[in-house]
Amino acid sequence: MKKFISVFLTIATMLVMLPLSHNASAASDERYTVLLLDTSGSVGFNVNGIKIYNADTALEYVKQAAVKFSNDVINSGGKNYIAVVSYNDNASLVSDFTDNINTLTDSINNLSSYSSSKNMTDGLNTASNLIDKVSSSEASKNVVLFSTGMVDSGEYSYSGIFSENTIGSEWQTSDGIPIYAYANSANAVAQKLKNKATIYSLGLFQTMEGVPEEGRNIASLFRTIAENLATSSDTFYDVDDPNKLQPIFGEVANVIINEESSGAATIRTSFGATVSEWAAPEIELAFENNLIPEVMLTFDMTKKVNRGEFAAIALQLYDTLTKSETELPSNCPFVDINGDINEIAIKKAYGLNFAAGMSNTVYEPISFITREQLATMLCRVVKKYSNPQWTLANDSEYYLDTSGVKTFADDKDISDWAKPSVYFMTKFGIVQGIDDTHFAPKNTTTQQEASGYATATREQAIILAQRIFKVSDIWGE
């Protein structure tokens, strides 16, 4: 016999509903962008002391693309400032933030290659320091990183997202340090930088196109490194031809120029987070109720929430509701969360059956969560709290009351597995459509991906948790 879940029966009248919507918004009119460019020279790859391949530099293509990018951004509307940082064996501040296109053009055109080393960690640290100098909390902050994914000098760490189990982990520098160890240090800096700015990672892998079979795994590692440095999959660009660098830099410029903001003022919370003014009261309540994961306390909450962060928010909500601390499961199949800032939370959310992967082994922690994924994960929290015996395996035994809910015009775009949760959470006012007729479950076009059509912000996600917590006594045990 199916168990009937009809909780929140009075919630609709108690909640002031929070629309996770694509609100009318304005592009930010103040933008600070750091161009972070790999200016190292060609590099050789050896197997058993024999050079098997030499990867050439693409610096001249990069310079042309960077000059065009600078012109596009500086000459767009609003206040635009660009800084240029180059890195090879160490990082150099080529130009501090300026809106003088002549200064930028000369700085970029004067770049040259003089070392094959790639100290990406130093480059990211320099970019981070520049972003810290931006005093405006409302300004758009971006880092546009060009690399080939290679990193082979500077700080290194054996602890992080990459390990000896990573494809290509056997490759090391002449001094015996594994490439993945250098990548861990770069990734750690990038993770912190993502809390302050959007990282656009442009990876040119064509330089490794002709590598022999015995070098294919290192080429795969380089791509993985570059992809993980991006803020999300939406801000990672796989460049397969240096001739495409200029149009791809142009695409990034267009995204930055048209980046949408709420248009609302932001303020600093009592605990150090940046939030929209309208969201501050409920975010403060969420903090008081222990609903904000510790790792997110100083984040910019106006930024989009990714899948790893939302797993942490869902777990925090569940643990707070149950007044317990979820144990770490004995196993977790996701191979792409090692070293992620939310690794432990993802594993626990998986153990509770809240977090499902994009495949059997891939979770995609840095991809922005879609609205249908968000609704589904929240619904699972509700199910588990209301019925501790609930699991994904016996989910079919729990019937969600969605009677009387009007079908969305974009119902065909809602995944079948998400529909019960979407309509249930909509019925009882936990989530809403972006307007009276559309839910926007996921992005279905490149334009929607660029605009964040089907995503939510960190503050919206936390406020949802706060509002569920507020009425939890109605449907708890």
Image (spheres, grey):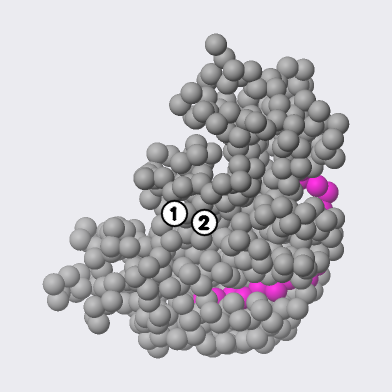
Q: Position of residue 130 (x, y in %)?
A: 63, 81
Image disc number at residue 153: none
Q: Magenta includes 36?
A: yes
Tell me if label 2 and label 1 are in contact, CB under 8 Å. Answer: yes
Is residue 361 something one can see in this rendering?
yes
What is the magenta range? 21-37
First-in-chain label (2 vs 1):
1
Question: Could one spot residue 101 in this view of the protein?
Answer: no
- Residue sitting at 63 percent across and 38 percent down? 378
In the picture, the disc for residue 337 is: 1
Secondary-structure class at tag 1: loop
Q: Nearer the viewer, residue 255 or 3?
A: 3
Q: Position of residue 359 (x, y in %)?
A: 43, 39
Depth check: give the residue in front, 387 or 151.
387
Q: Amino acid at mark 1?
A: Ile
Instruction: Tell me the quarter of the picture where residue 195 sits.
Output: bottom right
Q: Residue at x 28, y 76 (%)?
A: 177
Residue 467 percent location from the top left of the image = 76, 43
Taking 80 as reference, is 356 above or below it?
above
Image vertical order of residue 24 relative to residue 392, above or below? below
Looking at the rendered image, the quarter that the N terminus falls into is top right
Label 2 packing within 10 angstroms: few (<14), some (14-19), many (20+):
many
Is residue 161 a member of the stretch shown in magenta? Answer: no
Q: Which mark is residue 342?
A: 2
Q: Is residue 160 above or below residue 87?
A: above
